Structure formats: C-alpha cells, structure tokens
Amino acid sequence: MSTLRDIVYQNYKNQINMSLKELKAWRKNPISKKASISRKPINMAVRLNSKPVKKWGLTEIRWAVRKAIPYLKRAKQIKSTKIVAKGYTRNQIALKNWGYDVKKTLR
C-alpha cells in the first residue's frame, strides 16, 4: 500500500528529468542564476533528489506538493523564445533550476 509520501515522491519524480549529479553541476553554472529570484528552487531540488523516499519528511512533501510539482506543470506549458544566456530562455533556465531540462528531452 502506498503512503502519501510515496505518491508525492512518485509525482515529483515524474515531473523532473535531471539526476542529482546533473543538478549539482547545473547549480555551479553561472547561467543558473539568470532566472530564479533566489537559489531556493535549485537548492531544494538538490535536497529532494538527494534524499531517498523513506527520508522525506513534511518539509520535502510540502515543498513538492505546494511548489515544485505545480510550478513544473505550469512552466512546461510556457513557450518562450527570447534567449537570455547561451541558448537558454529565462523559462528554460528556471525549469532547469527546478530539475527539468527542456533540452534533455529534445536530444
């Protein structure tokens, strides 16, 4: 039987396509600072991906349900064209900060 934590975790994992290693490397890239207002989304994406589902607490569940999943669903629908840095639009950078690399799905 699945718990709420398991369901939220699976929902979150279905929205992202970046590994923990990819997120950590992206966080070091200066381009990652060109979209999100703060570093919180990328730091939380790293945190969510570094913890196994059994270690997820209320903080992780709340962040995934209230912030990450809804944002990712909304932002994936946005079609932006204005390039702001090295072939990335502001929306693509923000999505990547949250754990979804648009260019990865195009490869």
Image: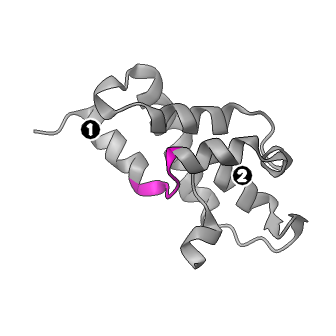
User: Where residue 56 sits: x, y (%)?
Assistant: 37, 26
Q: Point out the tag, 1 or 2, that comes first from the N-terminus.
A: 1
47 or 94: nearer the viewer: 47
Q: Is residue 82 left or right of residue 42?
A: right
Q: Position of residue 88 (x, y in %)?
A: 80, 65
In front here: 21 or 83? 21
User: Image quadrant of residue 28?
Assistant: top right
Eyeballing the image, is 55 above or below 33? above
Residue 31: % across, % down: 83, 51
Left or right placement of residue 53 versus residue 40 in this view: left
Q: Secondary structure at mark 2?
A: helix
Quadrant where the image shows the N terminus: top left
The residue shown at (81%, 49%) is 35
Asked if 96 appears above or below 58 in the picture, the reply is below
Disc 1 from disc 2: Cα separation? 26 Å
Crowdedness near tag 1: few (<14), some (14–19) or many (≥20) residues, C-alpha within 10 Å: some
The amino acid type, in three-letter code, at marker 1 is Asp
Q: From the viewer's perspective, is residue 34 above or below residue 50? A: below
At horizontal 81% and vertical 58% (from top left) the residue drawn is 90
Color theme of the render: one colour
Q: Which residue is mark 1?
A: 6
Write down the region rendered in magenta.
14-20
Residue that numbered label 2 is attached to:
94
Q: In the image, what residue type sits under mark 2?
A: Ala
Q: Secondary structure at mark 1?
A: helix
